[in-house]
Image (cartoon, rainbow, N blue to C red):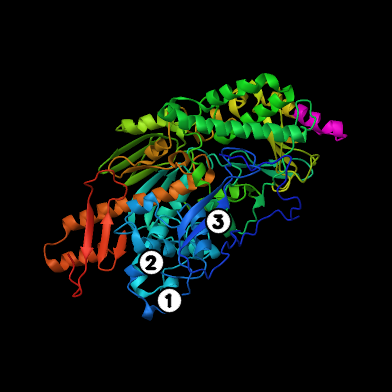
Amino acid sequence: MDLPPQFSSTLNPNPHPSPNVFLDPTSDSIPNLIQNPNSTTLSHYLSFSVPKKRRRGRSQRNPASFRLPLTLPTDSPSSSSSRAPASDEIIVINKEPKTEALIALSAGFPADSLTEEEIDAAVLPVIGGIEQVNYTLIRNHIIAKWRENVSNWVSKKTFLDYIPQHYHALLDSAYNYLVSHGYINFGVASTIKEKIPSESSKPSVIVVGAGLAGLAAARQLMRFGFKVTVLEGRKRAGGRVYTKKMEGGNRLCAAADLGGSVLTGTLGNPLGIVGRQLGELLHKVRDKCPLYCVDGRPVDPDTDVKVESAFNRMLDKASRLRQLMGEVSVDVSLGAALETFQQVFKDSVSDEELSLFNWHLANLEYANAGLLSNLSLAFWDQDDPYDMGGDHCFLPGGNGKLVQALAENVPILYEKTVHTIRYSGDGVQVIAGNQVFEGDMALCTVPLGVLKKGSIKFIPELPQRKLDGIKRLGFGLLNKVAMLFPHVFWEMDLDTFGHLSDDPSRRGEFFLFYSYATVAGGPLLIALVAGEAAHKFESMPPTDAVTRVLQILKGIYEPKGINVPEPIQTVCTRWGSDPFCFGSYSNVAVGASGDDYDILAESVGDGRLFFAGEATTRRYPATMHGAFLSGLREAANMAHHANIRTLKVKVDKAPSNAHSCASVLADLFREPDIEFGSFSIIFAHKNTDPKSPAILRVTFAASVTF
């Protein structure tokens, strides 16, 4: 739901910030890193900082840096007439391959190699060599070209004029992959909405859940030509993304994000792209985050730096410990390791230092929506390498704007609580109440908490492999108290501030405050409740919760001579008790691994029942953009399976004469999965059976096809 922003309470890396903290919606804010574009060396390295935002809530004082090997051409382009054969040279599209590689990297692609998904999709007949280099250069260029203006539909024709003819097979492969898998030409821009056909020409699909995953998949499937019906149990779309309008007297109102609120890694975040298409200006969550002691005093800056450094060293020790332990670490919790290290210096620190250390533990539990005692020492941070990079941002007016735009013109049936899903080789039946919805395929996007609870009965039962994965993965909890005040009494140059507790069991109780005054349209504060405190909060009377929050705020501000008024309106979340989620977001629990996210993503029933949601993506779990991307991913998977079935039916029913067969094949291969020169292929995408079918078409010079 939320990931912690990059916090820094005592050291501001930008001592003279721009007074305008909004990001330009027309720019990806990606610098041109090419220092010597005329270098003739093909082997280069990209080096840049990668703050581990999920690992540490506050930004590291010295963020980790890595060097990425990259083989890219930088010589000047020459005319196509003088070129050697495609297999013998590296294509030169422009003089900025490094910049384009970084843009592709932010979108989740290796700079100079293929993703596993691209390999599965057979974008190249042979992996490696010059052909792979050229493919990645073209792929990166297409991504970068679309990012220049995400409100446009970038067509294949855009590239035909300057990519030589003998590279068009690679262009076809890269472009078709990027479009079909939702890496370009996605979102809510008018030019993209125009591509949705007025009438469906493909089979029917039932999407269970109108969260970000379901909405992303539904829109993409509609553009592919499928007949889509979305069933949503709530009275609204968005799922765990919920922006509530809070109102008071004197025309006061504010938009409060009670669920997912922070857009993380905005360099590549697809929801940031949707925001740009809507013309929204993202607000960077500023680094300054002062912490306050139990009694309301500001934490001593030197103590803050000392404890944070010790905390980070402890996490590094935990990383080294798991390396030494090997496979044994799978059965050990992160909390147990940190507790062991903590005992070493526990008696030699002050009460304030101990409370500050516990604040960092609460922040870590917030990042993972789980108790440290439940998180896997081996794999709790397995998604760190896939961080998209960039700022953490708020969307002014709330993320409900994204939901509203994505839900526009999508056929959603509300208050349809699904309790049974039947699937077979003939199709699916989704049952909500006494209504039965039939379709060719179904996509289940319900949260992991619902799957764990067994709220939906699957007939036949899901494979044991998937049931085990559901059981192993963790599903944690984060709650909030949103408060609309008559006026802003806190500092307007802050987006966050924290408060320490002297009780370790309550360390996550109102430990962090978000100031939404600059983005919500009114004087709004939101207090976060994480860890063990988040579970106790579920049964805490709302009046008691608000009273406790006000005590903390008065302890901080009244000594400064500032009066803390009574809030005009308050809202307390209860995500753990919500029957449509039973929690907030997933984590890697003890005994689980990143593989379990992949297992949850696997389709069942021979390509009839699919799964999406933040708990189905090992790269971007526990994020809004992870849910969104999983929906695009499954739309591609469903389209591939539908194509395979259509191919099989048409071949089975085709007349025996050669002319009719050729006509059927020509129709089937209008949108092949891959094209290379004379070769076209349609295959069963992501089918784990090594004997799964694929159809190869070879066209000879005389237009004879086999």
Q: Residues within 10 Å of mark 1 (few under 14, many from 20)?
A: few
> Gap in Å between the C-alphas at discs 3 and 1?
27 Å
Q: Could you tell me which residue is drawn at 32 percent across and 47 percent down?
A: 686
Can you tell which of label 3 and label 2 is closer to the viewer? 2
Q: Which is in the foreground here, disc 3 or disc 1? A: 1
Q: Quadrant of the N terminus?
A: top right
Q: Callout 1, which amino acid?
A: Asp
Between 134 and 2, the one lying in front of the other is 134
Does the image show residue 89? yes
Comes first in the chain, label 3 or label 1:
1
Classify mark 3: helix, strand or loop. helix
Where's residue 10, x and y in %? Answer: 74, 40
**Secondary structure category for the residue under label 1:** loop
Q: Which quadrant of the view contains residue 657? A: bottom left
Asked if disc 2 and disc 1 are in contact, CB closer than 8 Å, the reply is no
Viewport quadrant of the C terminus: bottom left
Q: CA distance from mark 3 to mark 2?
A: 24 Å
Whole-angstrom CA distance, mark 2 to mark 1, is 12 Å
The residue drawn where x is 34% and y is 53% is: 119
Q: Is residue 131 above or below residue 487?
A: below
Q: Nearer the viewer, residue 124 or 24?
A: 124
Residue beneath disc 3: 273
- Give yes or no for residue 561 being in the magenta stretch: yes
Compared with 15, 232 (above or below) is: above
**Span colored in magenta:** 550-566
Query: Mark 1 = which residue?
Result: 161
The numbered mark at residue 171 is 2
Dot 2 amino acid type:
Leu
| Disc on the earlier residue, 3 or 2 | 2
Residue 289 rendering spot, x and y as whole percentages? 72, 40
Could you tell me what secondary structure mostly forms the magenta stretch? helix
Residue type, numbered disc 3: Ile
